[in-house]
Image: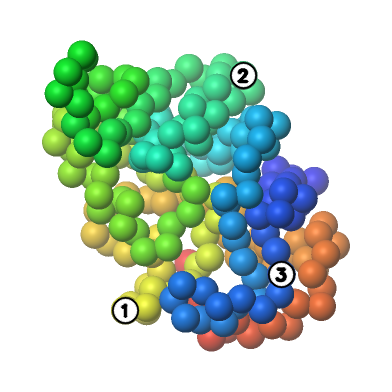
Amino acid sequence: MTYKEEFIKFMVDSGVLTFGDFTLKSGRKAPYFINTGNYKTGAQLSKLGRFYAECINDNNIPADVLFGPAYKGIPLSVSAAVALYANFGTDTAYCFDRKEVKDHGEGGMFVGKSLQDGDRVVIIEDVMTSGKALKEVMPKLTGAAKVQVTGMVITVDRMEKALDSDKSAVQNAYDEFGVKVYSIVNINDIIDAIKSGVIGGAEYLDKMLEYRAAYGVQY
């Protein structure tokens, strides 16, 4: 299997990707659901870091620092940094932000690598629904130093229209901030995995295709 197929199977085995009838926060009725909160063990986190590292390496994303937005992004950025070194010999720094600026000790907004002018920063997140997290962290990153945000890596791109736009959150992120969002897999990869028998869910394939036709975007 390719690393993308391995990741899709890993999501199913971890209970992160499930099929059925779900009402999303947007109000849309979807035949699949992704719950990244079901990653909760050391083994899962180790594997997850490897898939992030594969995506970064596969797309040749320049990275000096992996940034994990608090709170979910913190373990993700750490595991990805470890995996990049272990699997590809690429030694990157990592850092994450505090929700509140620390006014004692070393102080500051960030923990880990102190951002410097010229640093190439890759943001590590789990999913992108509305782009809210990116809007929150971009001023923090660019306010800390003249960094270059070379990309953002997420687990799954639903390739789905935003509620107020004909574009996806990934497309809007690029339009608004010039940040390219990379995903380990996208919804087309998941559909292909069902078709090829990598995972189950064939009974939901028609509904998946219908949902994609109703709300999907192409790029």
Position in image of residue 185 (x %, y %): 60, 54
| Residue 201, image x, y percentages | 79, 69
Image location (x, y in percent) of residue 31: 66, 76
Q: Could you classify mark 2 by the number of other residues whose Cα lies within 10 Å: few (under 14), some (14-19), or many (20 or more)?
A: few
Identified by mark 1, the residue type is Asp
In the picture, measured across the screen, residue 36 lies left or right of residue 120, that is: right
Q: Which residue is mark 2?
A: 86
Give the residue displayed 53% in from the left and 31% down from the top: 80
Residue receiving disc 1: 164
Mark 1 or mark 2, which is nearer to you?
Answer: 1
Task: Please name the residue shown 71% across and 75% down the image.
Answer: 20
**Direction from residue 101 to residue 12 in the image, left or right:** right
- Residue 114 or 1: which is nearer the viewer? 114
- Residue type for callout 3: Phe
Horizontal side of 180 relative to 77 (left or right) equals: left
Q: Which residue is mark 3?
A: 19
Q: Residue at x 49, y 33 (%)?
A: 75
Asked which secondary structure carries label 3, the reply is: strand
Q: Identify which residue is drawn at 37% across, 78% down.
A: 163
Q: Amino acid at mark 2?
A: Ala
Q: Is residue 4 visible?
A: no
In the rendering, at what x and y percent does residue 126 appear? 49, 48
Count of numbered marks: 3
Task: Look at the numbered disc 1 and give the secondary structure of its residue.
Answer: loop
Q: In the rendered image, which quarter is residue 162 located in?
A: bottom left
* Residue found at the far right of this picture: 197
